Amino acid sequence: MKLGVLTSSRADYGIYLPLLNKIKNDVFFELEIIAFGTHLSRSHGYTLKDIEKDSYNCIHTISSLISNDSEESIASSYGLTVLKFADFWQNHKYDLVFCLGDRFEMSAAVQSGIPFGVKFAHLHGGETTLGAIDNIYRHQITLASTLHLTATDIFADKVCNLLDFPQNVFTIGSLSLNDIKSFVPIERQTFFEKFGIPDEEFVLVTFHPETMSSQDNFRYAEEMKKSLKNISKDRFIVITMPNADTQGSIYREAIEKLKLEVPDRILLIENFGKINYFSAMYYSALLLGNTSSGILEAASFEKYVVNVGDRQKGRAQSKNIINCEFEEKAIVSSVNKALESGVYIGENIYFKLDAADNIIKIIKQFS
């Protein structure tokens, strides 16, 4: 069975990894990686090098991102991605192609495959993020896909509601948590020394723009900056940098200014990679920001999460999530509440055993 895997960012590649590792070792499959998006961007860490280290037999690369992050540039990147993938789908045939999530470039790659009859298997469909235009892209991908692998039964029901003829919809949990029971973090001292983190408690931070409220992002970025400066007085801060979203540079610039103001209290990371990121989550005091990782994964590390603003609004949450407005006082107060709450001991609604093995069973039957 010939499989293609669309990966456009560090985030989706990290989620795919448990499945990719199993597929590589199964003679039933012929695997080809299709890398595009920020993987090929020098300003986002050029994460193609991480894919190449994992020794796949075939890696296709497609460059289509325009460096600017204005609305016009994002739309132009979408169009360019469609054009380049039209040529790709014309010349490459697969039994099934995996796509994941809700990125605009992922949507473009999938939409261009429709006239060619490409069969897509979509992971993380049916979810809701009301503060991001990704919500629209995700549903576009769902409508273009043949096989649907959702994280919860709630999302499976949403996918069924989207489809005219709901079929091939399976709940498999969050694939990124597949190996969480056996995960062993990098040894603490080694990890701290590797990244220059002082021997103290730290807050793990990731902020992205609210692409449904673009007029507010300058204000939100300033509130983020003020709150992080306040928090840095008592806690060291490790920040993973924003992805290539509309107006993402607004947050990058605010973060870089913050680093200049309190250089000894802030660490900026362009790309951790999955093992390092999970280790950072394991050793952190809490997570802060508006990233899906806080919603999907942090509960399995017994961490509370301060989820800021509306980017993740509508996404199902475990009980470790503390929601707050994009305002300095509210953010600092919520961080203090999370710190006082200590260790989270509840369930993670996104975890199911053997997600990768279950996907392989499903696609073998699908073939």
Image (cartoon, grey):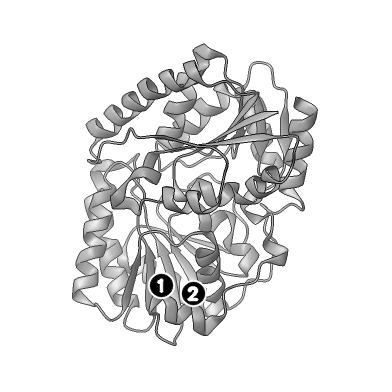
Seen in the picture, residue 317 relative to 63 is either above or below; the reply is below
Residue sitting at x 75%, y 38%: 27
User: Which residue reaches farthest top?
Assistant: 115
Residue 37 or 137: which is nearer the viewer? 37
Q: Amino acid at mark 2?
A: Lys
Seen in the picture, residue 105 relative to 92 is either above or below; the reply is below
Label 2 sits on residue: 337
Image coordinates for residue 142, horizontal then vertical, percent: 57, 27
Q: Secondary structure at mark 2?
A: helix
Image coordinates for residue 78, horizontal then vertical, percent: 34, 28
Tag of residue 333: 1
Residue 350 or 316: which is nearer the viewer? 350
Image coordinates for residue 347, horizontal then vertical, percent: 70, 62
Quarter of the image containing the N terminus?
top right
Image coordinates for residue 250, horizontal then vertical, percent: 23, 52
Pointers 2 and 1 in contact (C-beta within 8 Å): yes
Position of residue 200 in the picture relative to residue 73 (left or right): right
Residue 174 visible at all? no
Residue 360 or 94: which is nearer the viewer? 94
In the picture, residue 4 is in which quadrant?
top right
Residue sitting at x 42%, y 23%: 85
Disc 2/disc 1 C-alpha distance (Å): 6 Å
Quarter of the image containing the C terminus?
top right
Q: Secondary structure at mark 1?
A: helix
Q: Alpha-carbon neighbours of circle 1 within 10 Å: few (<14), some, or many (≥20)?
A: some
User: Which residue reaches farthest bottom?
Assistant: 199
